[in-house]
Image (spheres, coloured by chain):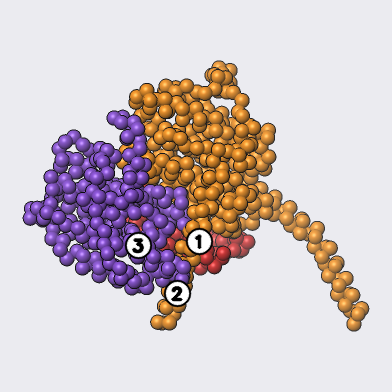
Chain colours: A orange, B red, C purple
Amino acid sequence: MLILFVLIVLKHIFVLLSCVPMENKNLELLEEKFQQKIDQDIKIEPNDWMPDNYRQTLIRQISQHAHSEVVGMLPEGNWITRAPNLRRKAVLLAKVQDEAGHGLYLYSAVETLGADREDTIDDLHSGKVKYSSIFNYPTLSWADMGAIGWLVDGAAIMNQVPLCRCSYGPYARAMVRVCKEESFHQRQGFEIMTTLCKGTLEQKAMAQDAFNRFWWPALMMFGPNDADSKHSAQSMKWKIKRSTNDELRQQFIDVTVPQAELLGLTIPDADLKWNESTNHYDFGTINWDEFWQVVNGNGPCNAERIEARTKAKENGLWVRAAAMAHAEKQRERTKQSA
Amino acid sequence: MSQQEWPLWEVFIRSKKGLNHKHVGSLRAPDAQLAVENARDVYTRRSEGISIWVVLSNDIVASDPSESPELFEPADDKVYRHPTFYDVPDGISHM
Amino acid sequence: MEKFNYLLRLGDDSLILGQRLAEWCGHGPILEEDIAMTNISLDLIGQAISVLNYAGDVECKGRDGDALAFLRLEKDYKNLLLVEQKNGDFGDTMMRQFLFDAYRKLLFERLQSSTDKQLAAIAEKSLKETRYHFKHSAEWVIRLGDGTDESHKRVQNSLNNLWRYTDELFYVDASDKVLTKQGILPDLSDLKSLWLQEVNTVLDLATLQIPTNNWQFEGGRKGVHSEHMGYLLSELQFMQRVYPNMEW
C-alpha cells in the first residue's frame, strides 16, 4: 500500500517535472504567434490569448486614461456655474459631460480585459493608480476654459489619434469614438481664446495669463523624455503605443506655436525658436522636478481632486445599494406573480 | 461590495432605419430600464441612434477563440458558395 | 407685460434648476448618472435660452436672453422656490426633479395649445424633453423609496422637506388671468388635481407618504426668494458683474 502510494507520488512528480519545460515551450510559442499577429496588424480581441504582461499593461494604461477623463471633469466643472453666458454654459457642460462619456467608453474597454471598473476606481482613490497630472493644476479664470480646451485637449488628441490604431480592439474602438468627440472640445477652447484675444485689454491679459500657466504643464502631458520612459519600448513593440513621447511633444509644439502667434499670445519660453535645419521648433528645458512632484502627489490640487472623486463615490454608495435592492425586489415580485 | 455593484450590460445601437443593431460598448445599471436610459445618455448624445438594445454581459455566450480553426476555417475552401466561382458566358446578363 | 412676466417665470424655472443640476457635474453617485443629470441640465438651459430670448423680444427694451439671465436683481427672478433649493443628497435632487417634472409635463402639454405660436412651439419641444426627465426622476424616486431602509428613510425625508414648496407650482395671479382671457395661457385650473394623481401613483410605488404637515411656502413667483438664491446668483452672475459689457 505504502509502496503504491510512493509510486503514485513519484509519478506525479515526474509528470510535473516534464510539464514545466513543455509549458514554457508552449508559452513561448503562444507569445511568438501573438507577436506575429501584432506585426501583421491583426487586432487582439478580448477572448484571444494574450501575454499576461500585455493584459496588465493595457489595464494600467486604459484605466489611467479613464481616470484622467473623469478627474478631468473637475477643473472645468469648476467654471460651469460661473460661465459668462448661456451659450458658453451649455457648451462647457456638454464638453465636461463628454469627458464622463469618454471615461465610460474607456472603463468599458478595461472591463473587457477582466478588470473590474470599481476595483480600478478604488486604486485611483488609494493613489495606487495615477491620472494625467495636468488636472492637478487649478482653474483660476474663465480663460482657463479656453486654455484647457485648446492646449490640454489639443495635446490629448495628439496622444490619442495614434491610439485609434492600437493593437487591442476595444481600446482602439473606444479611441475612435473619443477622438471624434474631442475635436469639438479643442475648437470650443480655441474659440474662447479667440474671443478673449479680440476683446478688451483685461480679457487679453486673462488669456495670456491662462496660456502662461498651462503651456508648460501641457508639454509635460506627453510624459518623460524617451530616454527616461520605462514602458515605451515594449509598448511600441506591442503597438499599444504608436509614437514616442518626444515625437508627439515636438509635433504638438510645431502645430501650436503658430496658433498662439495667430492669437497674438506670447509663448512663455525664451528659448523657443524655429530651427531651419530640423524644420522644428527648438524649445527650453521642461521642469522635470515639477513634473515628478505633481505626479507623486504634490501638485496644487492633487488632494482636492482625489477627495472630490472619493466623496462622489462614497456619497453614491447608498444610491447604488438602493437601486440593487429595488431590482432584487422587482425580480422577486415577478417570480411570485408568475 | 460586489452585492452593491451594478451588473454590466452590453449596448447595441441601431443608427438608422434599415441597419442592424451594432455593438457599441457597455455600461453599468441596476435594471434594464436604467440600462436603456443610460445607454441613451452615454451612446446617443450626438444622435447616433434610433433604437437601443441592452443585454446583460453575463448572458452573452461567445465562441471560443481557441476553437476558431475548427469553427471557421472549414468554410474557407468552399469557394463554390460564392457566385464569383462560376463562369458566366459573355452575353449573359441579369445573373 | 403680462406675457413678459409669464415668460420670465417659465424661463427662470428652467434656468435656475439647470444651474442647480449643473453643480452635480463631476460629483454624481455613479458616472452613468452624472451624464444623465448633465443631460437634464442641458435641456433646461436650452429651454432657458429660448424662453428668455423670447421674453427679451416681447419686452422690446433691447435685452436678450443673456441680459435677462445674468443681469437682473434677485427680486426680478420669478422662479419657483422649489427649483432654487439646494441639491442636498441625490435623493433630494431626484425628489425635487420629480415634483417639478410632473408639473412641467402637464404644463407643457397644455401650453402646446397656446394661441401664442412661439410659446406653443417652445412647449412642444420642451414637452419631449420633460417627458423623459419625468420618466427618469420618477423611476429614481421609486428605486430609492422601495430600495433599502436607508434609502427609504432618506428620500421620505426629502419629500417631507420639499412638499412645502409644491403649492407654489400652481400659483396664479391677476397677470395670468389676463393671459388666460387672451388664450395665451390655456385653462390650468385642473392642473393641480392631475398633478396630485400622477405624484400619488409614483409615491405609492415608492411606498412614500405625503407629509401630514401641509404648511406651504410661496414667494419665488413674486420675486421673494429663499436665502439660497443670493449665493446661486452670485455664481451665476459672477463674470457679468465683474467684467460688465464684454463679449465672451
Q: State whether residue A43 appears in this view.
A: no
Relative image position of residue A181 (x, y in whole percent): 43, 43
* CB-based contact (under 8 Å), mark 2 and mark 3: no
Camera-side mark, 2 or 3: 3
Q: Compared to B7, does A331 lie above or below?
A: below
Q: Residue at x 39, y 43 (%)?
A: A80
Disc sitting over residue C161 in the figure: 3
Query: Under tag 3, what secondary structure?
Result: helix
Q: Residue at x 34, y 26 (%)?
A: A199
* CB-based contact (under 8 Å), mark 3 and mark 1: no
- Give the chain letter at badge 2: A
Q: Quadrant of the N terminus of chain C?
A: top left
Q: For the residue marked with disc 1, what is the amino acid?
A: Leu
Q: Earlier in the sequence, mark 2 or mark 1?
A: 1
- Give the chain letter at badge 1: A
Q: Furthest-top residue in view?
A: A276
Mark 2 vs mark 1: tell me if same chain. yes
Disc sitting over residue A329 in the figure: 2
Residue nearest the viewer, comparing A256 with C100: C100
Query: Under tag 2, what secondary structure?
Result: helix
> Mark 1, residues whose alpha carbon is within 10 Å: few (<14), some, or many (≥20)?
some
Relative image position of residue A93 (x, y in whole percent): 38, 45
Q: Quadrant of the C terminus of chain C?
A: top left
Distance Cα–Cα, label 2 vs label 3? 27 Å
Residue nearest the viewer, comparing B9 with C96: C96
Q: For the residue marked with disc 3, what is the amino acid?
A: Asn
Distance Cα–Cα, label 2 vs label 1? 18 Å
Residue, disc 1 = A317
Q: Residue at x 46, y 30 (%)?
A: A210
- Residue C234 sits in quarter: top left
